[in-house]
Image (cartoon, coloured by chain):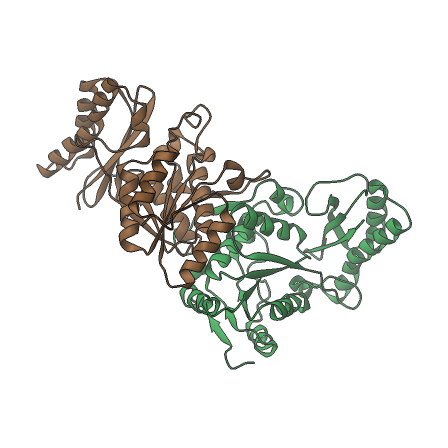
Chain colours: A green, B brown
């Protein structure tokens, strides 16, 4: 499988190879990442390998989706290890551009998907989804894949990507894959590596609060205020986690609900040892 | 030539036909228009016909590039005549979507190309280039052409389109064709149809002022303040034209210059009988 594996840093070279493969009837899958690959990323790669003839992974720590004072500079970078895993798995190409290749001098264009970028993550990171939407659109133009794969852990991001693809008539099919969790239930994230052993233990309160809400809902609780209060209480009982938000939204939207009356996402963000962590789950299928 | 001529209103149908043609090795040219075709549009069509194997013309009066109180409702619509001309000329397809096809309920995404949208037209029409950039990007995704043709008359628009294509890695080559003028020198525009015979005579002062500047420059005048003053004076001498701006900018930019020291665009906008008219020319090649 590794014979054809290629690492490309120039967009033009990569695009040509992709168009060529598509002309030969091959379906191309794209997995955009910021590297520091974990089981969540690899599940996206596996979905692409299963559904497409050729899988392209992009590795680019995108500066425009980080705010001032955020962790762009020390975001984990594990390129050699990432490439070894992708080669072994059967990926076809890795696109690992420089910042200059992605944002040549004078780059200014921004894609704004509107209202769905504003609440939740948009409050803590006001320009984050400008950066995400713009880089994803650029990558989809550079890698004109048949399908592109995103992880459900970044729930609001999946909405932003679907919205931009739909509003701008991007022909690539957007595929969202389930959250991958550690054995103890913690959602996999490249940022988990920032945590000390004790912070890692405290952070588990986040996924456990989602489990608690699921149990309460299964037992008949549909009042969001009560679910919210119990989740918060359970996290605060552990200590060490600063909850940024716990939001109950209608699935596929960022619209808050007060009662669980249909498919609902519980979306949360918390800070442990100054690391922001996200998690979510669906209830009310 | 007319056998294959097709008018399509659904994006999916059109995209499929285009991808199919490209897979068969045909180069596809795109001419985006708002209809009410005149010699300027037809010169773009002719350029595409000469350089591409298949020419697609889009006809869509895009509501999002009109401001409140502008002429969206009475913008000239001459669909039958437009189609007859395009068929006769040898076009392959016309894409004439409805507003609902282009902007389904909930459409919110906006493309902002940054600083170049702000001066000149951006002052009089603050949201105009959001609408232009967004619809052009949508059309380029719907019609993934090898080349797309735009008229130089809308100078700032050509910069906006080039900028979005470059910043967002749109693979289509952006081609800009020269202004086409009436016999007396007036730049062709669908909005010329709004003018009364006397307004049409007064409007000629705009293109004539550009001719005057060219003559002065050829005779050695490089001071922008003096060129500007003479142009304004010549337009005011005719009467009936309210000048919105006369700007001297470095070619390929919207950066004002004070001296003609290299390729320079003179870009102007004026209002005659409540119709805004644009024109421009290059000096200092």
Residue located at (52% from left, 41% from top): B101
Quick check: A14 above or below A276?
A: below
Left or right, A40 with reference to B35: right
Quick check: A275 above or below B201?
A: below
Q: Quadrant of residue A153?
A: bottom right
Residue A162 is situated, as x and y percent measured from the top left of the image, at 60, 51
Residue located at (40% from left, 51% from top): B165
Residue extending furthest toward the left: B219
Does residue A213 appear anywhere in the picture? yes
Left or right, B39 with reference to B73: left
Q: In which quarter of the image is residue A190?
A: bottom right
Left or right, A225 with reference to A128: right
Instruction: Return the residue nearer the eye: B37 or B107.
Output: B37
Quick check: A19 above or below A115?
A: below
Does residue A237 appear anywhere in the picture? no
Quick check: A9 above or below A70?
A: below
Instruction: Return the residue nearer the eye: B224 or A157.
Output: A157
Residue B47 is situated, as x and y percent measured from the top left of the image, at 27, 49
Instruction: Return the residue nearer the eye: A60 or A144.
Output: A144
Q: How many marks?
A: 0
Left or right, A284 with reference to A114: right
Residue A93 is situated, as x and y percent measured from the top left of the image, at 51, 71
Residue B182 is situated, as x and y percent measured from the top left of the image, at 20, 32
Residue extending furthest toward the front: B3
Q: In which quarter of the image is residue B124?
A: top left
Residue located at (34% from left, 39% from top): B84
């Amino acid at each position: 499988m590794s014979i054809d594996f290629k690492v490309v840093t120039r967009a033009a070279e990569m695009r040509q190879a992709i168009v060529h493969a598509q002309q030969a009837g091959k379906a191309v899958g794209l997995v955009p990442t910021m590297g520091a690959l974990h089981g969540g990323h690899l599940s996206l790669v596996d979905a692409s390998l299963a559904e497409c003839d050729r899988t392209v992974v992009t590795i680019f720590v995108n500066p425009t989706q980080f705010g001032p004072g955020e962790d762009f500079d020390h975001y984990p970078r594990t390129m050699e290890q990432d490439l070894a895993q992708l080669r072994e798995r059967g990926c076809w190409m890795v696109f690992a551009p420089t910042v200059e290749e992605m944002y040549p001098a004078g780059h200014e264009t921004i894609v704004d998907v509107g209202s769905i970028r504003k609440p939740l993550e948009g409050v803590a990171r006001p320009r984050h989804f400008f950066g995400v939407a713009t880089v994803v659109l650029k990558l989809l133009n550079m890698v004109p894949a048949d399908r592109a794969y995103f992880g459900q852990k970044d729930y609001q991001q999946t909405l932003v990507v679907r919205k931009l693809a739909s509003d701008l008539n991007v022909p690539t099919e957007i595929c969202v894959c389930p959250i991958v969790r550690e054995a103890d239930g913690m959602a996999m994230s490249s940022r988990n590596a920032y945590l000390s052993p004790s912070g890692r233990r405290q952070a588990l309160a986040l996924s456990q609060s989602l489990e608690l809400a699921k149990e309460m809902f299964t037992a008949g609780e549909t009042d969001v205020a009560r679910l919210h209060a119990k989740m918060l209480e359970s996290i605060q009982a552990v200590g060490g986690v600063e909850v940024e938000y716990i939001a109950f939204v209608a699935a596929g939207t960022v619209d808050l609900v007060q009662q669980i009356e249909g498919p609902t996402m519980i979306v949360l963000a918390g800070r442990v040892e100054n690391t922001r962590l996200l998690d979510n789950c669906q209830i009310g299928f």
